[in-house]
Image (tube, coloured by chain):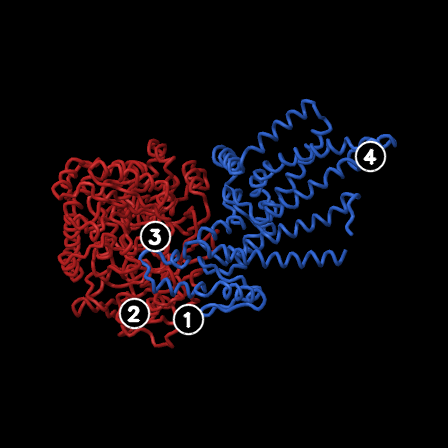
Amino acid sequence: MTLRKNAVRLAAGGAVLALTATACGGGGGSSSSTKSSGAPKGDKGGTLNVLLIADFEHLDPQRNYVSSALNFGSRLLTRSLTGYASVPGPNGSQLVPDLATDLGKPSDGNKTWTFTLKDGVKFEDGSAIKCADVKYGVERSMSDQITAGPQYAKQYLVGGDKYVGPYKDGGKGLDSIQCTDDKTIVFKLNKAIGDFNYTTSLPTFSPVPKAKDTNIKYDDHPVSTGPYKIQSYARQKSLVLVRNENWDPETDTIRKAYPDKIVATFGLDPAVIDQRLIADAPQDQTAIMLDSSIQAENLASVLNDPNLKKRTAAGLDGFVRYLAINTVKVKDLKVRQAIEYAINKESYRGTRGGADAGDYATGTITPVMKSHKDFNVYDAPPTGDPAKAKGLLTSANAMGFKLKIDFANTPTNAKSGAAFKEALDKAGFKTTLNPINPDTYYDVIGKPKTQNELSLAGWGPDWPNGSSVIPPLFDGKQIVPEGNQNFAQLNDPEVQAKIAAANNETDLTKQAALWGDLDELIMQKAAVVPLIYGKTNQIAGSKVKNVYLHAFYGELDMAALAVQ
Amino acid sequence: MFRYIIRRLIGVLILMVVISFITFLLFFAIPSNPAALSCGKGCTPTVIKATEHKMGIDEPILVQYGKYMKGLVTGRTFGEGTAVNKCPAPCLGFSFKTDQPVLGMITDAFPITLSISIGAFVLWIFFGISTGVISALKKGTIIDRVTMFVTLATVSLPSFFTGLMLLYFIVIKYGLMTFPSYVGFLDNPYDWAKNLLLPWITLAFLFAALYTRLTRANMLETMGEDYIRTARAKGLSERKVIFKHGLRAALTPIVTIAGLDLGGLLGGAVITESVFNFNGLGRLVVRSSTDLDLPVLVGVTVLAAFFIVMLNFLVDLLYAAIDPRVRLV
């Protein structure tokens, strides 16, 4: 349940974090320092160069599920029913209508959602986008041929779990996606979801014209609905976008579409990307980084140079890194609370690069989300409070409680593990470390039966709402024998009841508050030790304007960038 | 001679089959699952199974290998229902990662690797052999000592260091060139050479030093042979003695190594390609290893092995032409 699947591997394999740490939502926020000039209309034109480590995994909207590709694909090429505002700061995570006229209308106790398509929205060939195209797009996301994308349509739509996709359904389609006319699309859900309109921001809900569907080859040239279309795409080498003359800016409140052309170059070493952007040679003055962040070795020199800092966007990357406490193996609340007090977050952060790695976390919903609530249940210093932890352990009669910590075996995580062990042992626990192959880490800890007392994990939500954090991580109903994501194995009736209530709330402001309350409640139950809210830094060439991290994508906002 | 060539070609074919099978076996010995890797976090076992089915890795290894080999000869069809994709012979399959036809990926990457390798080869052979000969002929002089010192220094420098230094000073710091990016030879020969110059220098820097030392040692040995003394005694000019009798014999072992080196490079100059962002075979194989992209991995491995074996074979044939003492039976 995350678009940031690569980033989760990164959270497991911290050694490569620096390469793609931006692969997640959230940025800006209170800690972001941005050069947000807000390009006027006069900044139209020019070519924006995008320097990337790797080609996008998928630009096929139904397969697009990694944040750099999402930022690029969704903000430039393929529109969905809803999307996110293109503004600096926390308001970037504001849900806004995209192809739809509004944020959708729920009915039937939030089990039916109706969206109406805007007038004048077209594909790149000039044909009008119709309800049937959206229905077809969602249906193809359920095909086993269209792999790697999010599975929400299969999970949420009535009959989705049995549906085989449009290539094998004999033309029947899925009944729970209904077109009452060319403009109106109705989704019948198998449960009440009060914020289904967040889910529809994923490109899973982008239209695809059936006649132009080339199944697995659609990745090479998804038919554009956005301001740009693909002129050429040499996989693993380069991608050139030019203006889509059939995109009407009057129908699009999100995308600014300033540059005339966007050229992406793939396969660059992150150190080379850094050097090129720092050197700011003429050909790189209109260039940006996208799937990398400034490397640790260059960060200090960039931030200490006023001219370079001016071209740098810094902020939260949308991830929370945490230590899940297995509530099945550590049943006693006092023992769990002792863990909360014992952990030395400062030494953990130190193993990952210090203050540049992130801000200390107090919950699992990051500050860039509207659902974030300011609280600090365990008011201990970042170095922890071993005396208080020891006191709690003593009162629980659990001195010497044995803990085994699961972590993906990378050099960085090994250091973090050692830091945890030192802090926990100091508080009276007996800790052992359990390094696991990074490639199989989440498969291993995803089996509740064999998961140990503590597991190091990371999470980036699929949309900027608590519904993409709290239910997947803490809903007891979602505990499964394999592929489990509720690493705390929290199965608490009070939490579940409140999750159901929050899911049912269609007023997004009220719902956000409910998720914030739940985050605090879960902390009171000591199910996780939140460690840090990840941070990232990206730099752009001197002729690039609107350089800010988008609050949700945690990267430079592709919809807003302009060149002089 | 004809029978010898046929026999060797059959050997090459058998070797290719063995290498492709070993690559298959090694791939499945890795504890990771490419379907799970492609699926990511939160992927259910059902989705992983469906992805394994799509990739074809849910079948026994022998069945997969059989289908792979059959595809090479007759072509294959992938996908189900109306999502069918044909892969004409010789079919190397579709990439697990990008769904691109592997043959196309290889034919895209090969000209880049070929351009880097051939250009660097010419440079290092020219500079390596000429400095080696001069050094041998000027043995013990200041020229010899300086040459040997320089070659010792350059042979100690890894190509990633040389490449990054060239990039830093020539492109980034002094802006003498733009950042290299591959241009096809047929598109613009001048730009092709201009963009390849730094990768050529990087590779040649390393290899030329080796060849200088090798040529020097062989020349010194050859020039001390009896037949050289005989040639001089016959009154042949020193030029003829050196180039016709000395260098020709000294080149035989160098040709062997040059063939293997070139063959190895044609399989991908991984570091040089990475430093200069050239998407040749080397980067392709590294990427496919990281992504557990079996079809690409097998395709490039077999191709790389093919080059090494074929160049080795060509070297054997060249022996006779270079060294009259060697004759094929």
Residue for badge 2: A160
What distance separates the C-alpha of mark 1 from that of mark 4? 78 Å
The colour one sees for chain A in the rendered image is red
Q: Along the polypeptide, which appears first: circle 3 or circle 2?
A: 3
The residue lying toward the viewer, choosing from A374 and A380, is A380
Q: Along the polypeptide, which appears first: circle 1 or circle 2?
A: 2
Residue A161 figure quarter: bottom left
Q: Amino acid at mark 4?
A: Tyr
Q: Residue furthest right?
A: B234
The colour one sees for chain B in the rendered image is blue
Whether residue B96 is visible, yes or no, is: yes
Chain under numbered label 1 = A
Q: Amino acid at mark 2?
A: Gly
Q: Amino acid at mark 1?
A: Ala
What mark, if any, has residue A67 been given in the picture?
3
> Of helix, strand and loop, which one carries label 4?
helix
Residue for badge 4: B227
> Of helix, strand and loop, which one carries label 1?
helix
What distance separates the C-alpha of mark 3 from that of mark 4? 71 Å
Residue for badge 1: A211
The residue lying toward the viewer, choosing from B184 and A143, is A143
